[in-house]
Image (cartoon, rainbow, N blue to C red):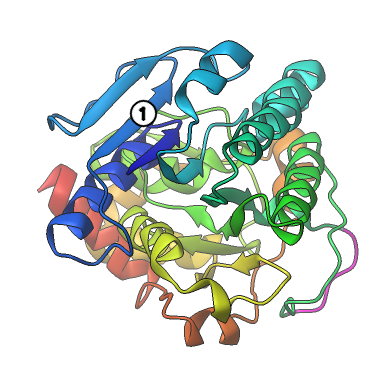
Amino acid sequence: MKIIVTGGAGFLGSRVISQLLEAQDAGRLPVQVTRIISLDLAECPVQDPRVDSRVGDLTDPQLVSELVDADVAGIYHMAAVLSGGSESDFDLAYKVNVDATKQLLEAARATGQRPAFIFTSSLAVFGGEMPQVVPENLAAQPESTYGATKTIGELMVNEYSRKGYVDARICRLPTISVRPGTPNSAASSFASGIIREPLQGVASEVPVPLETRMWLSSPNTAVENLVHAFIVEADRLGTWRVLNLPGVTVTVAEMLDALETVGGAEARSLVSRREDQKIMDIVCSWPGEFDVERTLSLGFRPDSSFEAAVRQFHEEFVA
């Protein structure tokens, strides 16, 4: 059997592929997976004979129908136009985040095999007035194009699952911090930049108020939870397949405190404030804490603290 990972050349996608291979070698996957296909606009960096890197456009129906066949045990749909890019290009956001998702679901439906369909969603589906801690049953009310497309995607994927066409696991990811590399088009990219750059001696700016509460996960923990989403038994998930993945709540001020604890006062001094209204309009509409009692009971887990995530990044990429 095989697993398809859209966005498999990206930072998170490639790590999910590596972790799936490790889980297969350890006998943790529910099926025997002999091949993983990365579908992305670039080559997948994972070097393993079981990884088939397909460079192509997810919106190409012929390519998708060629890859999604009866041998597919699971599909990780991680490719998307992110928050900043979605806000600046409405048409592309709907083409990739909505139309391509439906196309992928239709291809899975055509196999008649009900493959697992792991869809990465976002806390950007929320907006408006929210309680301090967001419960599982709070209705989505997005205030961005990205959030709207992810909300549509959630409903589509859950409906295809209800009809028995796929076995959905819809994972609302916390904001990922600390990401290595360079900034991306996500409005929340600063959540990594204000840690990553100063730890490497580069200045960075905070575009939101310091009291802004954020729901965060380290890359390693996010990847472990995404792999667990494939493993967890379907009969434990119920009919509403949306999962608020665990995170830690931290204000931007507390993030900078963690930066100083790990990197010292010199690193902290490299961060300045310059509010950006476009980023504030998106990020400040997101919730800062979730009730994750159910997802914890299903075996998903959060980081121990944001400081631990900063130390993890420092040890892996800086020290």
Outermost residue, left side? 319
Q: Is residue 106 magenta?
A: no
Q: In the depicted view, which residue is nearer to us: 220 or 171?
A: 171
Image quadrant where residue 82 sits: top right
The three-letter amino acid code for the residue at tag 1 is Ser
| Disc 1: which residue | 38
Q: Is residue 60 visible?
A: no
Write the start and end of the magenta stretch as one range.
128-132
Q: Is residue 218 left or right of residue 205?
A: left
317 relative to 256, above or below: above
- Residue at 23% x, 61% y is 311
Q: Position of residue 118 (x, y in %)?
A: 53, 51
Q: In the depicted view, which residue is nearer to us: 35 or 212?
A: 35
Q: Main secondary structure of the magenta part?
A: loop
Q: Is residue 46 left or right of residue 66?
A: left
308 relative to 272, above or below: below
Image quadrant where residue 59 sits: top right
Question: What crowding class fits label 1: few (fewer than 14 Cα within 10 Å), some (14-19), or many (20 or more)?
Answer: many
- Residue at 71% x, 80% y is 133
Q: Is residue 73 visible?
A: yes
86 relative to 198, above or below: above
